[in-house]
Every structure is written in C-alpha cells, then in structure tokens.
Image (tube, rainbow, N blue to C red):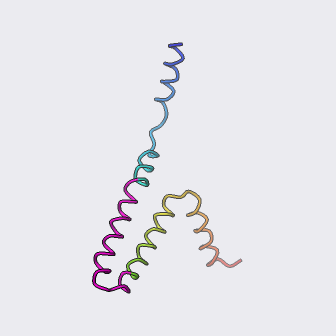
Amino acid sequence: MMAIDLVSLAQQQQQAPGTGNLREWILGNIVPLLLLTVALLLLWLGGGKGDNAGVMRRLGGVIVALAIIGLAVTTDAGKTIGQWLAGLFVGG
C-alpha cells in the first residue's frame, strides 16, 4: 500500500511544469478587475461631463482590446481567423 502511494507521488512530481494555473488565475482575476476599472474610468471621465460621444469612441477601443484578449486566450480561433484573412488576399 505504501509503495503504491510512493510510486504515484513520484509520477506526479515528474510532470513538466506548466502555466495553466497562472493562466486561469489571470483570466479569472486580473482581466475582470481591469475591465471594471476601465468601465469606471469611462463613466467617470466622460459620463459626468455629458460627453457621450467621447465615451462611445473610447468604448470602441475597449471592444477592440477585448477582441484581442479573446483571440489570445482561445486556442483555435486565432488560427481560423488568420486563415480567413489570408484567404481574402490570396485568390481562390
């Protein structure tokens, strides 16, 4: 019984270190915090002055940034979109 536990423990420690846990932590904590900060800044800077057009212009930039983050954290979407964009320039 003890030998089996030691073997399974040794197998677990031989696994290569990865960044999966760090990636999940960033996606679960840092990204929502940054989005909340950006939203509050947009409301505070533009909404209080009545500059609704300025807020919407900045919101467009935030949406582009979110799209880039989305492409960075997905696995196959970036490749698919890249192939589609290349297909636009390379004829048939």
In reply to whether residue 40 is colored magenta, the answer given is yes
In the rendered image, which quarter is residue 39 located in? bottom left
The C terminus appears in which quarter of the rendering? bottom right
Residue 87, placed above or below residue 50: above
**Residue at the image point whose x is 59% and y is 68% from the top:** 81
x, y percent for residue 33: 36, 60
**Residue at the image point whose x is 43% and y is 78% from the top:** 60
**Residue at the image point whose x is 35% and y is 63% from the top:** 34
Q: Which residues are magenta?
A: 29-55
x, y percent for residue 68: 47, 67
Residue 20, placed above or below residue 63: above
x, y percent for residue 3: 52, 14
The N terminus appears in which quarter of the rendering? top right
How many numbered badges does the structure rendering display?
A: 0
Q: Main secondary structure of the magenta part?
A: helix
**Residue at the image point whose x is 36% and y is 64% from the top:** 36
Question: 19 or 2, which is in the foreground?
Answer: 2
Question: 59 or 12, which is in the foreground?
Answer: 59
- Would residue 82 be found to the left or right of residue 63 on screen? right
In the rendered image, which quarter is residue 86 located in? bottom right
